[in-house]
Image (spheres, rainbow, N blue to C red):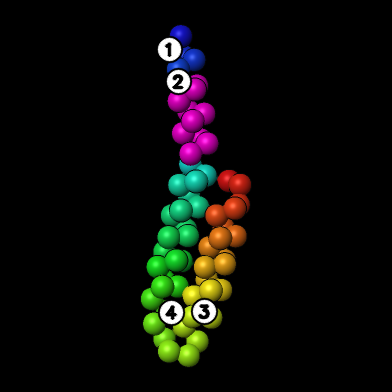
């Protein structure tokens, strides 16, 4: 029974790790995009591109 609980726990951690790993990558991207959006001329366009890239990284099944 203890082995089964350990296997289930490891499986759940494995499933959650992909979500956590993509968030570790995309959160700094989104923060950087928000900081860049302050630039008057090209800021919003750059923010949109970075945000789009972060959305794509979020959809990667790890």
- Where 29 sits versus 15, above or below? below
Which residue has dot 3 on it? 46
Pointer 3 or 1: first along the chain:
1
Residue drawn where x is 57% and y is 67% of the image: 52
Does residue 47 belong to the magenta stretch?
Answer: no
Q: Position of residue 37 (x, y in %)?
A: 43, 79
Mark number, residue 2: 1
Are circles 3 and 1 on residues that touch, CB within 8 Å? no
Q: Nearer the viewer, residue 30 or 14?
A: 30
Neighbours of disc 2 within 10 Å: few (<14), some (14-19), many (20+)? few
Neighbours of disc 4 within 10 Å: few (<14), some (14-19), many (20+)? some
Q: Nearer the viewer, mark 3 or mark 2?
A: 3
15 lies left or right of 28? right
What secondary structure is found at the residue carrying circle 3? helix
The residue segment tinted magenta is 6-16
Q: Position of residue 55 (x, y in %)?
A: 56, 60
Pointer 3 or 2: first along the chain:
2
Q: CA distance from mark 4 to mark 2?
A: 46 Å
- Where 28 sits versus 61, above or below? below
């Amino acid at each position: 029974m203890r082995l089964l609980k350990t296997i289930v726990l490891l499986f759940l951690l494995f499933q959650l790790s992909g979500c956590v790993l993509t968030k570790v990558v995309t959160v700094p991207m989104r923060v950087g995009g928000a900081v860049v959006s302050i630039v008057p001329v090209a800021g919003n366009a750059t923010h949109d591109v970075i945000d789009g890239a972060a959305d794509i990284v979020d959809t990667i099944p790890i």
